Image: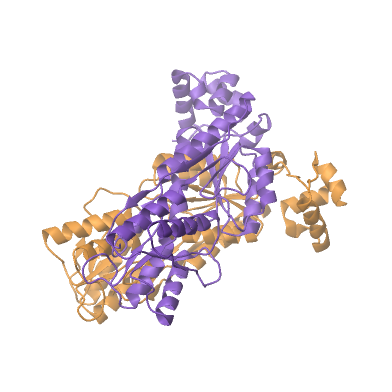
Chain colours: A purple, B orange
Amino acid sequence: MAKKSYKSMDEFANACGVSRPTLSKYFHDPSNVKEVTRKRIEAALKKSNFEPNLFARHLNRKRTRNIGVLVPTISDPFYVQVVTLIELELRARGYWPIQISSHTRPDLEEEAIRTLLALKVAGAIVAPLGAGSQASTLQRLTDTIPVVCFDSPASFDLPYVGNDNAQSVAAMVQYLCRSGEPPVFLEIPQVNENSGERQESYRATMLKEGHEPLVIDCETPASWEFERLGFEQMQTILKRDGLPGRTLFCANDRFAFGAMAAAFAAGLKIGRGEGCDVRIAGHDDHPLSRYTCPPLTTMAQNAAAIAATSVEILLRRIDDLDEGRPMQDDKVILEATLVMRESA
Amino acid sequence: MAKKSYKSMDEFANACGVSRPTLSKYFHDPSNVKEVTRKRIEAALKKSNFEPNLFARHLNRKRTRNIGVLVPTISDPFYVQVVTLIELELRARGYWPIQISSHTRPDLEEEAIRTLLALKVAGAIVAPLGAGSQASTLQRLTDTIPVVCFDSPASFDLPYVGNDNAQSVAAMVQYLCRSGEPPVFLEIPQVNENSGERQESYRATMLKEGHEPLVIDCETPASWEFERLGFEQMQTILKRDGLPGRTLFCANDRFAFGAMAAAFAAGLKIGRGEGCDVRIAGHDDHPLSRYTCPPLTTMAQNAAAIAATSVEILLRRIDDLDEGRPMQDDKVILEATLVMRESA
């Protein structure tokens, strides 16, 4: 069946049997119009090729209903998990997420922010690159639109939703200490604030438990390819000195994947059962961690709450801006949950 | 250092010491202006808060330099790998990718296409949802702008870049047959054209090699959570009948991950060495496949060529449209490479 074409909003409003302002209201926010009107417009949309020209519409409005979602990389299953939840939540609330990845490169993060500003997004949810970020670029974004950071707080004061690294790392260290040999900490490169916080909590908790902390820094040049780094670091450790202990706590799950693969390749048996050579634990509980061999013991970040809270705060701040209300200082730190599996 | 603000393109062109048309040319495509001019504009941009209003600019032009990239899900490492390569290539060539995921839902795929059309993207690279796609929605996109499909061809005639499933599956079956027991094929749900093509090639190659094909269909309701499906299917198989053979060929790597995890949990030793119980192979060589325990033997799709060719064809078609040239019928099918690792 050929679909009808319309040349303008007026023509399409006529065809729907609604007024032009009502149609605009609908496109601004479907929940702005009565249920019966909404259904009438949507039935007409289905039968037509009508596309309101977003560029034209947005010129007449303070802002769009697009929301930028910026992360360092979508090659990281943890970011993918949170971004997916953020996108579904935004769509359910009538906003359109525009996801941009900086591919872990500061120049592309800067370009991504420029693009988001040029697209006049109403707000942005950002996991900053961290150590590599240009503070001035992020400042420019936050000077212009409401922004919420997640995963890694920016260096200056912004609303932030993140994991309680002090709590989560302490919980894992305590669990490992009471169930076997105290853990050695395998550090990742310091790409953002998380690594520092996690190492600090590891050291403090080990001392509190009466053990000497032992941190092994990652020797491969910094990168976000954590599986490869974990694999190479474990190979180096095994070749040079052998296992530094019978329990290894990796700073994140992706690093643990690589470390497990290298230990397995060296003929070591990983796990907490009889006859195992080494226990390996991670941090994050990303979606594949339950499918490693053996399944990975880890701290599950509360991805659902991180996503929901980020959206909640951002939309509230957009409203506050619209209504001229002062914005609150939002910082939400969420506890993680110990997930005991076979690896440790 | 406070950055300078400009109110219009004219004001900013003055500050750069270039003419307004030259500045427009630069924003249209930086390679349009002389190297020395480009540097002058970029130095001024760095010191300013100037953002050309994309919405305003695009009203005066036939189209934007934005390119839509639409995939079923970014929870699939294969899509992430190709999307990342596509985005980097587009950015390197002066285009801005806008990535949207349909989260494997037909209603969101339809909404994503509506969004891309409303944003007036110059073209789109699409991995269609497949079985769940609304043909009419995709048709609407392809009626309006140049589109290239990858991974899964749409049901009607469009430029397409994909894997040669006949070749890749035959290569794996032949390898498995000559190195041990002929493989049993573990099928995934038929979410798109790939599964049918792969199963067909498995059956044909087995017969050609003189063996009876054996396909085990996935019994869990269709979904894109392949790791979970593989895990549950393997559990079901082991509980009901035990291993159907000593070599299992999974229709993709993600399904193989789950199958390996269930086999491991049941105490089976996976691999091609002495004393192993079962060989498991996959298809795709997604980025984590080298880090499973044992590392996964698989067919590596040529992700780099899939990404580069998709971008190449799309940009050529956009140019053809600009110049009024007839478009060629582009279909590029790329061979995959056998990656022998420890699992099979």
User: Toward the viewer: B190 or B250?
Assistant: B250
Residue B281: percent from the left, percent from the top? 30, 70
Total labels: the figure holds 0
User: Toward the viewer: B204 or B344?
Assistant: B344
Q: Where is B119 relative to A40, above or below?
A: below
Q: Is any atom of residue A296 visible in this view?
A: no
Q: Where is B24 relative to A219, above or below?
A: above
Residue A51, image quadrant: top right
- Residue B236 vs residue B162: left or right? left
- Residue B343 vs residue B86: left or right? left
The residue that appears at 16% across and 66% down in the rendered structure is B243
Q: Where is A310 relative to A107, above or below?
A: above
- Residue A240 vs residue B205: left or right? right
Residue B329: percent from the left, percent from the top? 52, 59
Q: Is any atom of residue B298 visible in this view?
A: yes
Residue A269, image quadrant: bottom left
Q: Where is B197 relative to B337, above or below?
A: above
The residue that appears at 53% across and 18% down in the rendered structure is A18
Instruction: Specify the quadrant that holds the C terminus of chain B.
Output: bottom left
User: Toward the viewer: A97 or B58?
Assistant: A97
Residue B61: percent from the left, percent from the top? 71, 44
Q: Residue reaching furthest left?
A: B241
- Residue A268 vs residue B40: left or right? left
Residue B34: percent from the left, percent from the top? 81, 61
User: Toward the viewer: A22 or B288?
Assistant: B288
